Structure formats: C-alpha cells, structure tokens
Amino acid sequence: MPGDGIGKPVLDETIRVLEAAGFEADYVEGDIGWEFWKTEGNPLPDRTIDLIAKHKIALFGAITSKPKDAAFEELAPELQAKGLVYSSPIVGLRQHFGLDICMRPCHTYKGNPLNFIRRAQGDDFDEPAVDVVIFRQNTEGLYGGVEWSDPPEQVYDALMTHPKFVKNFGKTPKEEISVSTRIFTKKGTERILRAAFEHAKKYNYKSVTVCEKPNVIRETSGMMFKMAQEMQAADYPNIQLWNTNIDAQMMWLTKNPEDYGVIVAGNMFGDIVSDGFAGLIGGLGFACSAQFNPDTGIGVFEPTHGSAPKYADYETSIVNPIAMIESACMMLDFINENDIAARIRKAVADVISEGKVRSYDMMKMRGKADVVKNGAASTTEMADAVIGKL
Ligand code: NAI
Ligand code: MG
C-alpha cells in the first residue's frame, strides 16, 4: 500500500532492498489514501480491506490527510451531495483489524550525524546509545473516536452525575462543551502490557516502564499501572517495572535516554513518547513501526512519517528510505524471516557508519529539490548503498 506522496518512492526502494536480500514474495498493490477519497469518497476502499484480510501482511508507505472542510472541497463534485465525512484510513485499518499492538523501536545508529548529543563536564559531550522499544496501545484511549461537541442530553445527564463535572463544568452551557473520551479496557490494557513484557523477556531488557500519569488520570492510567504491577509480580519477577509520568518522561528522555528499555503506554502518550525518542535517533527518516493483532496474525508495517507532500513532486525523490526499510525488517521478524531482517539491518547500519552515502536529512540540508546536486544521496541512491552492502 504505497499510499500518497513520498509513500510510493520509499516503498518502491524498500521492495528492491527486500528482493536484493533474498526475500521472495509476490506483491499485490492495495489502494489507500487521498486519491481514493477524492475519486471514490473512501480513502480505504473495501477491496483493500479484503486484500489485507486475505494476505494478512501489509507494507504501507504513507497517506495524506486534511481537515474535514478541506477534504470536502476536494471531493469529486458528484460525491459532494452524499454527506461523506473524511476519516483517517490508518485509524480505520487499526480499528477494523484490531491492530491493537503498536511497536516502535528507537535504536541509535553508530555514526549517524543526527544522533542526540548531551553536554558533559566542561566542553565535553556524550552521545548516549539509545535502545528503546515503545509499545503503544493502538485502538483505544483518546484515539477511540468517542467524542462530542455540544453532547446529546443523555451524555450530558450522565456527566452531571459526576460531582467533579458538576463542580467544574456544571455552570458552562452544554453547547459550549466538547468532550473527548479516554476509554481503556482491561482486555486492551492487558494485551499491550503482555506484549511489552514478553518483548522485554525475549530480548533481555532489564526494565519495562509504564509511561502514563496515574497520579492525576487515576482511572485509566491508574488501571494500567496496577495491572502492570500484578503482571510483573506474577510472571516477570526478573524484569524491573518502572513508572514514569509522560510529562517528566519527555524531559528525562534528553537527560538519561540510555537508561530506558521497553516503554509501554496508552494510545496518545505512546504516540508522544515514541516521537520524542525518534528525535534522539535521527527523526522521521529513521522512525519505523509495526502494528499487529497477535491473535489473527494480521500486521501492517509502516514508517512513522507521513506523505511529505512538498517533496512528492520532485523529479528525483530525496527522502530517506531507512524508516520504511526498517519497518520492512519488522515485518520480516513478524513472519519469522529473522535472518533476512538481520542482514538488512546490518547493511543499513554499515551504510550509516561508513558515512559515504547520506540523504539530505543526514547532511543537515533543507529539503530542496537541489540537494542531490549538492551532494546528498537520493532515495534511490540510499537504497543502492544498502543493496551494495548486502
Ligand atoms: P510528514 O512526516 O509527512 O513530514 C514532515 C517533515 O518531515 C517533512 O517535511 C520532512 O522534512 C521530514 N520527513 C518526513 N519523512 C522523511 C523522510 N523519509 N526522510 C527525510 N525527511 C522526512 O508530516 P506532515 O508534513 O506533518 O504531514 C504531511 C501529510 O502526511 C499530512 O497530510 C498528514 O496528515 C500525513 N501524515 C500521514 C501519516 C501516515 O500516513 N501514517 C503520519 C503523519 C502524517
Ligand atoms: Mg505520531
């Protein structure tokens, strides 16, 4: 599913790398994204859902999303009268297939000029090695979609049964109130915690950190931390359980990022903390992710970045394909092609540490069309370098 904008070049190059590494597969193209919203009024056509249900494994580039009104304006005129409302096909995919486990590793690459550095004593600096894997609950919480502006009477009446609502919001007119819910279920929470602990056990991480805010958000964050304590005590006595608040964590990640191992969080905080850690290892050109349902074996593997529309029309694509290539490695691990994944990761690491071939972001250039002329590697040249190492 290449999707929109730079999704296509990064996916094309990644498939070349997979083939060069000896991964034999037939690829079926799935339609997703803005083009299908404009022409069909649905960015996630049923035929794409059927394809994923049938084949179970998807590599996904990126899509373009726009706010409600802008989306409506770009809709084909004959569809505008149908009352269609744009919603993100990614969130749709997660919910349709229950892809509730989202995994986002952030590992420092040796020699990456974008690595985070920290002041040490005097004029010295340290370059801490980050090796963190974030487990983000992917279907519930603040992204669950249960929200209202000017809520219906029944909802308002229900809220008025809560003393804090009466005290803090009871005098505000109903039509001036917007509510976005943060619903956690025991089942969803148990599954993401289990995935996090199992990963820590399998790969010998010494700690699992629950990154929420249980002191303030008592019911949801509180439930997650309590369940983590019970799970750790029962099944993972050799793994330490740490508890950090999301706000403090965002500060600590630039102070002691090397201390963290596996981190687990709800949907919103997991999104935030994973972007924070991605910034320490080179940013969007390097941030990869997997989302899957362990029960059905359905998985969608995608870079964290979006479609970067401003770069999509350059004659030569300039964006860094590493985030997509690393996402494909996560796919390979998911289907137990671990040897091929390890070889590709080694090739990527070698290209970065050698430092001869660097995309514009690694050269710290502004992303203009002329960066290749000025010495940056194009998307294709980055992939060629990885293939060369393979
Ligand atoms: P973006 O991730 O597309 O781009 C932000 C900036 O990051 C780019 O301008 C570029 O400077 C840099 N960047 C992104 N990918 C890069 C790469 N592979 N190599 C080097 N630099 C890279 O985010 P933005 O601009 O906020 O959103 C653009 C569109 O993408 C929007 O329509 C948004 O809704 C959509 N989006 C889609 C996502 C998805 O498909 N999962 C995720 C995030 C945004
Ligand atoms: Mg994000």
Image (spheres, rainbow, N blue to C red):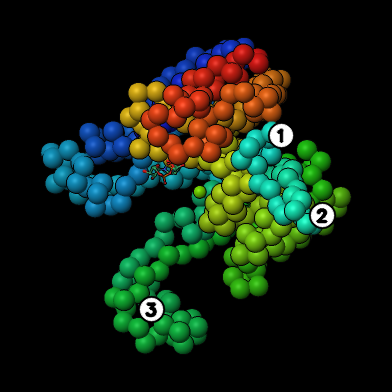
Label 2 to label 3: alpha-carbon separation: 43 Å
Q: Is residue 371 visible?
A: yes
Circle 2 residue: 240
Q: Amino acid at mark 1?
A: Lys
Q: Residue at x 31, y 82 (%)?
A: 173
Q: Is residue 78 left or right of residue 327?
A: left
Q: Is 374 rendered above or below residue 165? A: above
Q: Amino acid at mark 2?
A: Gln
Circle 1 residue: 110
Q: Position of residue 60 (x, y in %)?
A: 47, 31
Q: Residue at x 67, y 55 (%)?
A: 254
Q: Residues within 10 Å of mark 1 (few under 14, many from 20)?
A: some
Please, which residue is most extreme toward the front here?
123
Label 3 to label 1: alpha-carbon separation: 57 Å
Depth-wise, is mark 3 or mark 1 nearer the camera?
1
Provide the secondary structure element on which disc 3 rests: helix
Circle 3 residue: 157
N-term mark: 2 or 3: 3
Label 1 to label 2: alpha-carbon separation: 27 Å
Q: Residue at x 71, y 57 (%)?
A: 255
Asked if marks 2 and 3 touch (Cβ < 8 Å), the reply is no
Asked if marks 1 and 2 touch (Cβ < 8 Å), the reply is no
Q: Residues within 10 Å of mark 3 (few under 14, many from 20)?
A: few
Provide the secondary structure element on which disc 1 rests: loop
Q: Position of residue 133 (x, y in %)?
A: 68, 44
